[in-house]
Image (cartoon, helix red, strand yellow):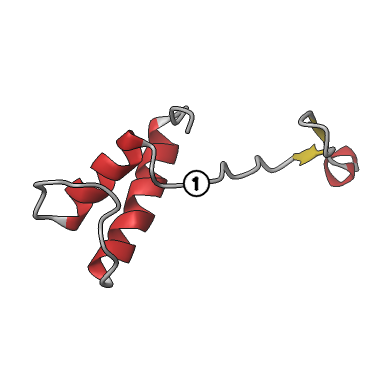
C-alpha cells in the first residue's frame, strides 16, 4: 500500500480503525500496544489498513484517473 500523502488522511484512517478495534475487532498485525489508538496507528503505518482518499469538492473523477472541474462548479 502506498504511503499516506497527508497527516489528515493518516488521522482519519487511524481514527476509524481505532473505533473498530474498540468495538472488538482483532489487530491485523502483532503489536505490543495496549491502547486501540496506538495499535491503529501502527497498522496504518504498516500499510495493512485500506483507505480511500475523499474527493475534493469542485473536482470530479472522469474515470481515467484524471480529475477536472465538475459541472456543478462551472455554474
State the image quarter where residue 65 is shown: top right
Q: Mark 1 — residue? A: 51
Q: Which residue is drawn at 28% across and 57% down?
A: 18
How many numbered callouts? Answer: 1
- Please determine whether, in this image, residue 23 is positioned above or below residue 33: below
- Please determine whether, in this image, residue 62 is positioned above or below residue 35: above
Q: Nearer the viewer, residue 61 or 72?
A: 61
Q: Nearer the viewer, residue 10 or 29?
A: 29
- Please determine whether, in this image, residue 27 is positioned above or below residue 61: below
Residue 52 relative to residue 66: left or right: left
Q: Nearer the viewer, residue 69 or 50?
A: 50
Pinpoint residue 36: horizontal percent, then vertical percent: 19, 56
The image quadrant where one finds the C terminus is top right
Q: Residue at x 75, y 40 (%)?
A: 58
Q: Which residue is drawn at 8% across and 54% down?
A: 34
Residue 38 relative to residue 12: left or right: left
Residue 55 relative to residue 61: left or right: left
Pinpoint residue 45: horizontal percent, then vertical percent: 31, 35
State the image quarter where residue 41 is shown: top left
Q: Is mark 1 on a helix, strand or loop?
A: loop
Name of the residue lying farthest toward the bottom: 23
User: Circle 1: is it few (<14), some (14-19), or many (20+) Cα within 10 Å?
Assistant: some
Q: Which residue is drawn at 13% across and 55% down?
A: 35
Residue 28 relative to residue 65: left or right: left
Pinpoint residue 66: horizontal percent, then vertical percent: 79, 28
Amino acid at each position: 500500500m502506498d504511503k499516506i500523502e497527508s497527516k489528515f488522511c493518516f488521522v482519519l484512517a487511524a481514527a476509524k480503525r481505532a473505533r473498530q478495534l474498540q468495538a472488538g475487532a482483532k489487530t491485523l498485525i502483532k503489536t505490543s500496544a495496549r491502547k486501540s489508538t496506538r495499535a491503529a496507528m501502527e497498522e496504518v503505518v504498516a500499510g495493512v489498513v485500506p483507505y480511500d482518499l475523499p474527493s475534493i469538492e469542485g473536482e470530479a473523477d472522469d474515470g481515467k484517473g484524471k480529475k477536472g472541474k465538475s459541472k456543478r462548479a462551472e455554474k
